[in-house]
Image: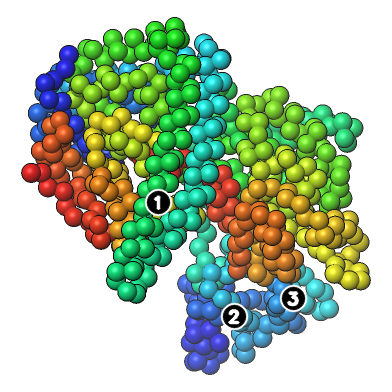
Amino acid sequence: MNPALRKLLRKGTPEPADIDALIGELDFPLVDGPDVTFVFRGTADEVYLRCWISGLDTAQPFQALPGTDLWATTIELPKGSRIEYKFEVITSGTKELILDPLNDVIAHDPFGANSVCQAFGYERPKWTLHDPVARAGSLQSRQVESRVFQESREIQVYLPATFRSNRRYPLLVVHDGVDYLHYADLKAVLDNLTHRLEIPSVIAALIQSPDRLKEYGGDDRHARFLVEDLLPSMNDAYPLRNAADARCLMGASFGGVASLHAAWRFPEHFGSLLLQSGSFAFSDIGRHQRGPVFDPVVRFMNEFREQPGRPADRVFMSCGMYESLIYENRSLVPHLQAKGVDLRFEEARDAHNWENWRDRLRIGLSWLMPGPAWMVYE
Amino acid sequence: MSPEVPLRLLLGPQRPVVNLDSAVARSGIGDGPIGVISAAWQEAEGDIDDVQRLVQNPLSDLRIYERTEGLFAADERLHEAYRLRQDRLKEQQRLYRMRLEHLMVAARQTLHTEGDPTIVAAERRHAISQLRALDRHHLGQVEKLHSRFDSVFNADSHTLLAEHAAAIEDDLSRFKTVLITGGNVIVLVNRLRLYGLDRHLRRKNIIAWSAGAMVLCDHIVLFHDRMPQGRRDPEIVGQGMGLLPGIVLLPDANRRLRAKESVRTSLFSRRFAPAACMTLDNGSLLLFEGKTLCDSEAAKRITRDGRFKRVRAA
């Protein structure tokens, strides 16, 4: 048991005021080296810790602490871990999935929010936070007329703070770009890394699919949209370096599949790829077990693994150790390396979520697109 | 307007501690007007109010970066050729880096390894000589790319470029002393080279910090052991103006170099020998009268065995 809770219970049944005082004093969950204790206070029949961590039970039961309205459960988390979770509270047969009421640290994603446990050794990187000293880039909306999809698609375009029309910029194409802005602080990250000279001033095309599970899952139409619609539109509107080595495709999860697929279909167009927790499901024999939405992904990945070609010169991959896709991501590494791709693979003690992807952006972007810090001597 | 024996006052970064004011005061540079080259600041060129507050001498920025932007805007052919040259230089640098990486690993391994001293010493020497040969080859290739551009675009053959070069020369003639700020060393050296300014600066007193000091050396050596991806091997990127022969200047070395990794620092020193690798950290000062070091403060030289020794004037 966590030492603070043990101390509370040592005197017998604690007074509510003692519990109030303890809760007021401590940060939750309680981190004591590798042991992390989650605490729920309230009336319930059962309480579970729900976290989607490959390797842990998805529902970890809490124990009621005798003589109190506290519930607690302890898990072991290696140094530097970060996990997202909720509490499942069952009262009179009714299940409720809630955020941890004692923890203010919350991560958002397109499906809502989760509580965040920052284990011993994890600290949110400073470069992910708004830095008032870093000059802010700007965002503008743009319509891309798509002949492939026969419709107009709205994208967001990030321009660096020092944008000048007489310069030429590299292009970063970001799948789920608006989600990256909202949930992975992409704008602050780009502003900060540019300010620190760790990446060059870049123009980023932030695309968002209306049907990502279909279009990002190895769909030729999407690859053609990037090459035949998006790139010409961006080249017309912005001063871009018109060369593959000045173009990077980036995406997470299905966005990673879309990036790899587009670069594989059109290998001369994108010099580098940033693939985060790519949903690179494949099957060596028989049917895969990931559900029908993965059918086209598996078809593409099986084909890719047979004939990987050389989709890009440089690839940065990252994946959380606590997500089931770590196996697929690790498996992809030798396939790309065997084709002479300059590849860097980074594993993190995190899971399939936006803040994991946010925290890896510095190392990925600055490796694929090194900034002028190297040549600036102030 | 030129001094008989020009002074070269070299400083480290001017943050967090400023020593420009005290260094100028003790250098004997005098109180005449000073021309400023802040092209390494790019878009922030000319933003010299903070510098002016530090020195008594009237300052006037030569606006070389802005002038070049105007030149490029006026002559698309020149701009395109310049871009093409830069793309080729990047490609050349990429290939150099590809080869350098392997030679550096091999050289570090020979410095690390133990064994028969005679055999090991011979292999170390050879490993380092291979590095130096690659550096020489690379410098030659870079110079060829520059020469190809210079043969078409030079002050003799290109009217607009000649006009700009003459205007800068005219501006410079008003100053006995020129101050060159830190910033982007590649941008700076490219601009200076475009107008052939090494000829004119040779006869001036020069106050320079960080990147501004680096461009005065024979060669420009980029280095940074603390990039987001970790250590990066030092790279030669091209020739400097050669006003301070036999010196490789390392601004902000405290922050950029892993000074305790003596194999790396020893290799740094031996690779560029006989040039002396000298640090220019915040608060440092080196003062040369012509080519003679006559004053120094807090600057250090990397020894052959990778230690840092205080630089002392004779």
Identify the residue position indicated by label 1 in the image: B131
Can residue A227 be seen here? The reply is yes
Residue named by callout 3: A58
Which quarter of the figure is the C terminus of chain B placed in? top left
Q: Is residue A146 left or right of residue B282?
A: right
**Residue situated in front as seen by the camera: B312 or B108:** B108
The amino acid marked with disc number 1 is Leu
Work out whether A86 lies above or below B50.
Answer: below
- Callout 2: residue from which chain? A
SS of the residue under disc 2: strand
Mark 3 residue type: Thr
Residue A131 screen position, x and y as percent: 48, 45
Image point (15%, 26%), residue name: B6
Tell me the tag on residue A76: 2
Left or right: residue A342 versus residue B120 is: right
Residue A207, percent from left and from top = 74, 40
